[in-house]
Image: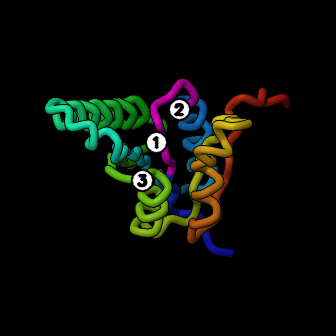
Amino acid sequence: MKETNCIVVPVDFSEITSKLVDYAVNMASRLSGMIHFVHAVHFYAGDMMLGFPYAHDCESKLIKNAEERMENLIADNKERCAGCTGEVVIGDPVEKIVDFARAKESDLIIISTHGVKGLEKILLGSVAERVLKRAHCPVLFLNPFKENKR
């Protein structure tokens, strides 16, 4: 069995990110693996089609904000997760997460679900499910809403 040396962890900086990070750091320490965090910033074509002159400024601010949050995530976890890295990528989240994991030659992707149901899931789909279908390596789902009972 191949060792799990490289773990990719997509983060969205939502309220569940801290649970995902805690879980991933714990798993990486057990597996002696290195974590690479990734955050995808996605701009929708409709945003540009409206022709607002400040759309480019808004994009720049979103990217800068994401980069700052990633730097903070790495800094907050540097003691628990020595050598972990983080990167902000621009584009479709599924495509960019899968490409990032392939480029890093990852052995595992740890991704959280959001519990999306009903019409929203039908219309938007699940990023986690689509990553699972396209990934070159195993994908571990974390349900952050389920209480861990031991």
Residue 112 lies, in percent from the top left, at 62, 42
Q: Which residue is mark 3?
A: 92
Give the magenta range. Answer: 9-16
The answer to whether mark 2 and mark 3 are in CB contact below 8 A is: no
- Amino acid found under the numbered disc labelled 3: Asp
Position of 8 relative to 47 (above/below): below
Q: Which residue is mark 1?
A: 81
Count of numbered circles in the view: 3
* Tag 3 secondary structure: loop
The x and y percentages for residue 127 are 57, 49
Give the Cα distance between marks 1 and 2: 15 Å
Q: Position of residue 118 (x, y in %)?
A: 73, 36
Residue at position x 62%, y 48% in the image: 125
**Residue named by callout 2:** 17
Quick one: label 1, few (<14), some, or many (20+) residues within 10 Å?
Answer: many
Counting residues from the start of the chain, the first of labels 2 and 3 encountered is: 2
- Compared across the picture, whether 49 is left or right of 120 comes to left
Q: Amino acid at mark 1?
A: Cys
Foreground of the two, 64 or 118: 118
